[in-house]
Amino acid sequence: MIEKLKQIQAELKAPKGQFNSFGKYKYRSCEDILEAVKPYLKTAGCALTLSDDVVSIGDRVYVKATATLFDDNKEIKVTAFAREEETKKGMDSSQITGTASSYARKYALNGLFCIDDTKDADTDEFVTRTKSDKSDKATDREKKLFLDRCKELKVDYKQILKEVGVAGNMTKEQHGKALEILKQIEESKNE
């Protein structure tokens, strides 16, 4: 089973099939990953399932997504969590849960199949980006845009910064991811 998973991880390419016109960047969805992995599952003779549980931790509610890879009687599981907001303007409770489920499932699949958006340390792009660290930082204008959008959508900006992994200065990549989250929130409010 581990050998089959290693092979899938080594060969799987999950393209970023979505485009965020607001933030002007490409991203991959849970559906993109599932479409990319299906041929590898067939070749390896494995099956993949996704499931969700709603769990309370303290006074917060999370969706716990589990991606399970099966081969005969063996299985490998990876879980990921996404927090449900108590309320989101324009969304009913099933939409809130659905948004958290989609987000958690994507990250469970990322964990199972070792999908990472960062570049390898031995690539030219990594070296170039590391040397030009200043250009990788989000500009004051980009930060203001993010904060203004959070205010417009009545979203806690601190939670989004936490979700995209901002520990100090926001990078352009983190800015793009934060805008994608805001775009998803806005779309779900408009449904």
Image (cartoon, rainbow, N blue to C red):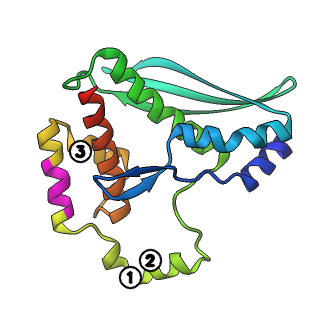
Q: Residue at x 64, y 40 (%)?
A: 35
Q: Tell whether 180 sits left or right of 36.
A: left
Q: Amino acid at mark 3?
A: Lys
Task: Please rate how many residues cluster around mark 3, counting C-alpha atoms within 10 Å: few if below 14, some from 14 to 19, many from 20.
Answer: few
Secondary element under disc 1, as helix, strand or loop, is loop
Disc on res. 129? 2
- The type of residue carrying mark 2 is Arg
Q: Are marks 2 and 1 in contact (CB under 8 Å)?
A: yes
At x 20%, y 53%, the residue is 146
Residue at the spot x=17%, y=56% of the render? Answer: 145
Locate residue 130, reporting x and y percent.
44, 78
Q: Is residue 146 magenta?
A: yes
Which three-letter amino acid code belongs to the residue tagged 1?
Ser
Q: Position of residue 141 (x, y in %)?
A: 16, 65
* Chain-order first, disc 1 or disc 3: 1
Q: Image quadrant for the C terminus?
A: top left
Mark 2, secondary structure of its residue: helix
Look at the image and tell me in which quarter the N terminus lies.
top right
Q: Secondary structure at mark 3?
A: helix
Q: With 98 as the anchor, is 28 left or right in this view? A: right
73 inside magenta stretch: no
Answer yes or no: is residue 58 visible: no
Residue holding disc 3: 158
Instruction: Give, as a single range, the part of the protein colored magenta.
Output: 142-148
Q: Nearer the viewer, mark 1 or mark 3?
A: 1
Looking at the image, which residue is at 76% across and 47% down? 8
Q: Nearer the viewer, mark 2 or mark 3?
A: 2
Q: What is the chief secondary structure element of the magenta stretch?
A: helix
Q: Earlier in the sequence, mark 2 or mark 3?
A: 2
Task: Give the number of marks.
Answer: 3
The residue indicated by pointer 1 is 132
